[in-house]
Amino acid sequence: MKVFVDTGLLFKRKMLETLRNPVFIIVSMITPIVYLVLFAPLLNKLTGVPGFTAGHVLNTFIPGLLVIIAFLSGLFVGYNMIDEVKNGVLERMRVTPTSRFALLAGRVLRDLVNMTVVVVLFVLLAIPFGYNLNVLGFLVELVLLAMILITTSSFGNALGVILGDEDKLSPIIQGINLPIILLSGMLLPMELAPKWLQVVAHFNPAYYVVEAGRQLAAGHFLNAKVGYAFLFMVPFTVIVVVWATRTFQHSVS
Amino acid sequence: MAADPVVMTEDLKKYFPSKKGAVKAVDGVDLSVLPGEIFGFLGPNGAGKTTTLRMLTTLIPPDSGRALVAGFDVFTEPDKVRRNIGYVGQSGGSDLPATGRENLVLQGRLYSMTAAASKARAAELIDLLDLEEFADRIAYTYSGGQRRRLDVAVGLMNRPQILFLDEPTTGLDPQNRANLWAQINKLQTEGATIFITTHYLDEADVLCDRLAIMDGGKIVDEGTPQELKKEVAHDCITISVERHEQNAAALLDLLEHADFVLEAGAEDGHIRLCVSDLATGLPKLMRLLDGQGVSLETVRVVEATLDDVFLQKTGYSLRDLTPEG
């Protein structure tokens, strides 16, 4: 089917960009490494306080960092999209019979591969620091991270198409970036938060993934929090992808 | 007409909403483009040229009217239109982090060509548009002229029945413009049909077989460049008299009232006058000047330009709006 062929072609095309410039992978790892080295040690004395009950603090902290990696890997892709809008690349492809879904999916798939590479490398790096890797839990976690990435990358790409201008994109991206990170408990567990913050966090899909990630890291596959994460993320991802595809179909750029 | 037109529109309209009411970007355009011709849209920015082109290339739907491109309706059969056209937008379209050849091959693949066919076609176009030298370099490193040629090659990958070029030489230096004109002419000799928009008078004059002059969303005149210029009819003569002639103002006055002169005016040291017929007007002018004992320093005959046509049809000069750079 044309949609799969086109997705494959465009994925290959974008992947080539990553392979030609692999320094991107290193750049993506800087933020989580800085957190691991400069922030995680602050948590050592918190072992045992609410939210940090799973042995080494890294077992609580790393799952949150993985969500940050997935989240940031997708959120900023709009800038690359804007480049292509400005260079007329997207418009040129829209005048061909290329599948509109493929125009989005090829890019998102590339971002997914990049994120997976970064996440795997980072987890391996965290083991010597004391992180206790549960392989099966990590694999399930990867599915959740993939949904975070697909959501943010679709959103970022669609936003790039709609706005077509970095100066308009920046305030939106920066405006949602920090609140979503802080309200998900990625850095510090929401158990430490006052009641009202905990209530607000429940409206943040990323919160469920962070919570589920900590259960998965501890091997608690059947914990309700894991179920909630899938329950929220599956429909949320579908809604965002449908919206982004429609934007690509109707874009007036 | 022997051959069916490649583009045919009927009362094509596109209005854009704005705070002050609808902007009539394209307000009832009828046109047809025949196979093998270079058809030009000449007009200032905002005349509706690009909007018309975007409707013909399926990028935006028309509000009303009809447009057939390559025999298919742009509104109801956009996919078939897309398969049969090539399009080079104002901002180019080449993917800059990839090489020229990669751009071409991917474009072919997106048209469902096999990898082998796509590679062969890419090689053909690299040859046709003289891209060999840089085809395997990343497009970021290209000069403006090289990038434009790649853009055009990308637009030709699917052997389109018609190639749409939206202001293809804007931003190019004179040498690269001339080069691109030569490439476009070469494409025509290879049998291509080309639809071009431009706000450059010389480009429209040199390149196009047929022109539509567009202003305010409407076509105000249409024909070959020669036909259009003939419509305006009058040729002009520029003369300058010797320096010691003190009676320039009196001379101008005399010329303005001569029966063979349509209009006359002073223009930085020269007198410019338009006559209805050069063959009879020029001898009359000479006799008149001779009778006045005026000796001439220079005489120059200026034939009507497309700008004269534009001026007559729209009431303003295109040259004033878009100084040639």
Image (cartoon, helix red, strand yellow):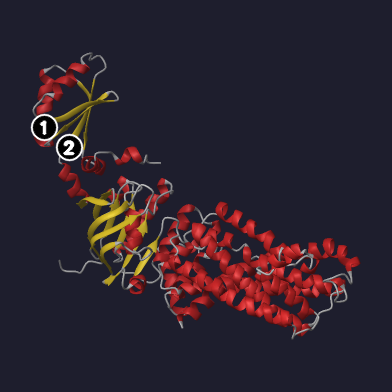
Q: Where is residue A70 in the image (x, y as percent from the top left)?
A: 68, 70
Foreground: B156 or B124? Answer: B156
Q: Determine which quarter of the picture holds residue B26.
A: bottom left
> Are callouts 2 and 1 both on one chain?
yes
Q: What residue type is labelled 1?
A: Gly
Q: Position of residue A14 (x, y in %)?
A: 57, 69
Q: Residue at x 28, y 51 (%)?
A: B217
Q: Position of residue A36 (x, y in %)?
A: 81, 65
Q: What element carries label 1?
A: helix
Q: Name the residue under label 1.
A: B281
Total of numbered circles in the picture? 2
Q: What element carries label 2?
A: strand
Q: Mark 2 points at which residue?
A: B235
Q: Pointer 1 indicates a residue of which chain?
A: B
Foreground: B46 or A150? Answer: A150
Q: Earlier in the sequence, mark 2 or mark 1?
A: 2
Q: Pointer 2 indicates a residue of which chain?
A: B
Spatial CA distance of label 2 from label 1 is: 10 Å
